[in-house]
Amino acid sequence: MIFLSKLRNLSSVLLPILGIVIISSMIGLMIFWETKGRELYLYCDVIVLKEDVKRGTIITPDMITVVKMQSDNLINNPITNENDVIGFAAKHFIPKNLQLHKEFFEIPELVTKNNEFIFRIPNDWIYSVPSTLRRKDKVIFYSVNADIGKKTISGHEGEIATYDPTEKINISDMQPVFSTIVAYVKDSANRELVTVSKEDRLDGSSTLSEIDVIITLDNLKQLENIINNGSKFIIMYDEGANI
């Protein structure tokens, strides 16, 4: 009886204290959730533009800002690192405060200006290209009349003739026409030709069948005049990483 009496007395003291602790904890959790918790667990930092951006605009640090957006409202793979957008050009109009994606941007050289367009070089215009040519490479067109470098050039019917870029070609008898950027390099199935090996470019995903470059109307007229005079083109490149 004495034990039960003491237990009742202890309970009468502890239960109100425990109730106060539980209520205080709940209030603390609610305050934390409303002030910090919701932002920590439901929101993510994403990169957006401060102002509307037109096609071709190169993004600079002062043009971007970081905002928090609810995770449920995010697009797939939004840009969250400013280095993924600074220095790149907008491929189209982008309104301010819009979530950004890597497909919205390209290296400046590949975003065509008002007087430029992407042109597929007809295969029969090409004497030869490097077998390791890739998208974003800076290339130089040379016109050629004679069978220069014939030993290093190979190709089958329907394919673009290629040469091994590790072997030197005598360019003393060739005339430089102009330089430009490769927009696409595709195989016969219209798929982008990419490097499979991590070591170098020699291991490609397929055989080169199509080359698209960025040119102007004046460039196209130059090419057509050369072809009409019976010449073709040897194309040489600098790796895209060095542009």
Image (spheres, grey):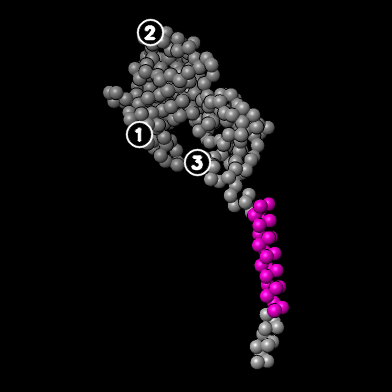
Callout 1 amino acid: Ser
Residue 125 occupies which quadrant of the picture? top left
Residue under pointer 1: 206
Q: Hey, which quadrant is residue 85 in on the image?
A: top right
Most common SS among magenta residues: helix
Residue 82 lies, with reference to residue 134, above or below; the image says: below
Residue 178 appears in the picture as rendered? no
The answer to whether the residue labelled 3 contacts the one labelled 1, judged by CB atoms less than 8 Å apart, is no
The amino acid type of the residue labelled 2 equals Asn
Q: Which residue is mark 3?
A: 76
Q: Which residues are magenta?
A: 12-36
In space, the residues marked 2 and 1 are separated at their CA atoms by 31 Å
Where is mark 2, residue-wise? 228
Q: Earlier in the sequence, mark 2 or mark 1?
A: 1
In this view of the protein, which residue sits in the foreground, 51 or 126?
51
First in sequence, mark 3 or 1: give its number.
3
